[in-house]
Amino acid sequence: MPDEAVLEDLLSRPTPPLVEAMARVRGDLVILGAGGKMGPSLARLARRASEAAAVRRTVTAVSRFADAALRGALEADGIATVACDLFERTQVDALPDAANVIYMVGQKFGTSDHPPRTWAVNTVLPALAAERYRAANLVAFSTGNVYPLWPLASAGPAESDPVGPVGEYAQSALARERILEFWSRERGTPMALLRLNYAVEPRYGVLRDIADAVREGRGVDLAMGAINLIWQRDANAIALRMLEHCASPPVVLNVTGRPAHGVRWIASEFGRRLGAEPLFQGVERPTALLSDAARCEELLGTPETGIAEMIDRVARWVKDGGRSLGKPTRFEMREGSF
C-alpha cells in the first residue's frame, strides 16, 4: 500500500516562492475549518514554510475535530489546535488572536437534502469570523461555482466577468463572498477571496473520481466536457502567499490550473496508465464549469505541478491500492444539485 506519510510530506513541502512570502508575512496564523480535505496539509505547509523562512510563528488549526486522531497528528507536527463550533459565539470569541487568517469553512454536499444548513454555514459563519478577526489579513476560499457554465471552446470566465451561480450551493457561496466583501468595505479588513476549481490529490478530487471509474469499468460522464485542475499543494501555497496581497475591498482571484483539460482525454490517459479501456456515457455539452486563472498566474506564477504529473501520481496511487477518502466531487453535475 502507498505510504500516506510520504504523500503528506509531498503535499506540505514548501516551494521557494512560498518560503520567501512567509518570511515577509508577520504574525501568527489561524486556519478556520482546518479539518477538511485541504486544511491539514495547508497547516503543515504553513508551519514548514515558516520554519524554512526562520520566522517564529504559531500556526493554529481550528475545527470541530470529530476525528481525534487528526488533531493528535497535527499537534505532533508542531501545529496548535483548537476545537471550536463556529456557530457558538462564545467559542468564536475565545479563539486566539492572529494577524493572519485562512478561512476554509463551507458546506457543499448535502445542500439538496438540507439547504437551510448550507445557507447558515456559508453565510452566518463568515460574518462571525470577519467580526472576530476584523484587524487580520483574511484569505477566504470560495469556489468557481459562482460563475455560470461557460462556452467549452473558451478559456472560461475571468474575475471581471459576471457571476451567475447555478443552484443553492453556488448561490450561498456567492452570498459568502458578498458578506465578506461587506465587512471588508465597512471595517477596512484586508481580504482575498479565492475562487477555487478543482484541487486534487491522490485520495480525492476529480482525477481520483475519473481514475476509479476507469479502473472499475464504470462509464465516465462526458456532460461536463472539460475541467480546470490544480494540485492541492499548489492551491494551498497560493492561499498562503495571498496573505501579503490582501486588500479592502477584497482581491478576487480565480485559483486553478489552465488551460482546462477534456474529461475524455483525462480518462484516456488513465486508461493507458491503468491498463483499462475507458467507458464513456453521454456526450460533451457546449458549456462547462470553467475558470480563467490568467490573473493568478500573472501575480504568483504558473502552478508548479502540471497535468501530466498530477495524472501520473493519481494513477500510481490507484494502481497500488492507495486509500480513497470516499468523497466524490460530483463534478459532472450541471444543475447545481449536491
Image: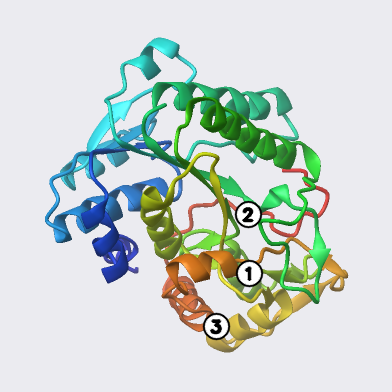
**Around disc 1, counting alpha carbons within 10 Å, would you say few (fewer than 14), some (14 to 19), or many (20 or more)?**
many
Q: Nearer the viewer, residue 33 or 298?
A: 298
Q: Which residue is mark 3?
A: 274
The amino acid marked with disc number 1 is Ile
Q: Tag on residue 210?
A: 1
Give the residue at x 29% y 28%. Answer: 82
Q: Where the C terminus falls, by quadrant?
A: top right
**Around disc 3, counting alpha carbons within 10 Å, would you say few (fewer than 14), some (14 to 19), or many (20 or more)?**
some
Give the number of the mark in front: 2 or 3.
2
The amino acid marked with disc number 3 is Leu
Q: Is residue 199 left or right of residue 162?
A: left
Give the residue at x 69% y 54%. Answer: 330
The amino acid marked with disc number 2 is Thr
Reply above or below: 137 against 216: above
Quarter holding residue 90: top left
Determine whether the residue tagged by mark 2 lies in a helix, strand or loop: loop
Q: Where the N terminus falls, by quadrant?
A: bottom left
Q: Which residue is mark 2?
A: 329
Mark nearer the N terminus (2 vs 3): 3
Determine whether the residue tagged by mark 1 lies in a helix, strand or loop: helix
Q: x, y (%) of residue 202?
A: 46, 66
Mark nearer the N terminus (1 vs 3): 1
Q: x, y (%) of residue 171?
A: 74, 38
Give the residue at x 77% y 71%. Answer: 225
Reply above or below: 309 against 109: below
Q: Is residue 5 visible?
A: no
